[in-house]
Image: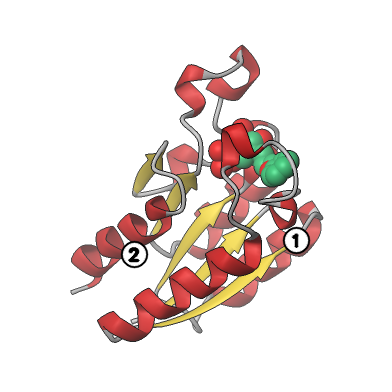
Amino acid sequence: MKLLVLNGPNLNFLGIREPEIYGRATYADLVRLIESYAAQNGFSVECFQSNHEGDLVDKIQQAYGHFDGIIFNPAAYTHTSVAIADAVKAVGLPTVEVHISDTTKREAFRQVSYVRAACVATVQGLGFDGYLKAADILREILK
Ligand code: CA2
């Protein structure tokens, strides 16, 4: 199993600001956690973070034929981007939407997710462990 882990805008700032919402661990810590979970569980991962909508769309398209599934925290683009939702739908790879925080308990504008309809599951409010749970979900689907 080969998974692509995508993170959207500002998640490179993890651990630097807003620790009360996103915790104190950094983006590098997140990548280390996911890579060591993959090594322990016998699958491979590539992690990619971008602040740019088009770069995320390009990376989703490039995943076609190269990855078995996608773990995706589109960050603010969750709530705004039809282009990203269309890209996930277009490649047809099983994709799990992940959010570190529980968006259901936050502002009204975070209650909309354009990408959700294109995803096989949503995991939110579990902190970094949500990415590991997403990998477990994809492993079940892909086996
Ligand atoms: O909870 C999540 O994972 C979110 O996807 C994070 C996004 C937010 O727009 C979504 O509604 C929920 C924001 C990511 C910003 O990350 C920061 C990290 C540290 C400091 C500031 C922002």
Where residue 135 sits: x, y (%)? Answer: 34, 64
Disc sitting over residue 50 in the figure: 1
Indicate the secondary structure of the residue bearing disc 2.
helix
Amino acid under disc 2: Ala
- The residue tagged 2 is 135
- Residue at horizontal 50 percent and vertical 35 percent from the top: 101
Answer with left or right where residue 53 lies relative to residue 81: right
Where residue 63 sits: x, y (%)? Answer: 56, 75
Amino acid under disc 1: Ser
On screen, residue 73 above or below 19: below
On-image quarter of the C terminus = bottom left
- Residue at horizontal 60 percent and vertical 24 percent from the top: 110
Whole-number angstrom distance, CA of label 1 to CA of label 2: 20 Å
Closest to the observer, 68 or 4: 4
Q: Residues within 10 Å of mark 2 (few under 14, many from 20)?
A: many
On screen, residue 110 above or below 32: above
Answer with left or right where residue 35 lies relative to residue 26: left
Closest to the observer, 82 or 73: 73
Q: Is label 2's Cβ within 8 Å of ligand 1? A: no
* Ligand 1 location (quadrant): top right
On-image quarter of the N terminus = bottom left
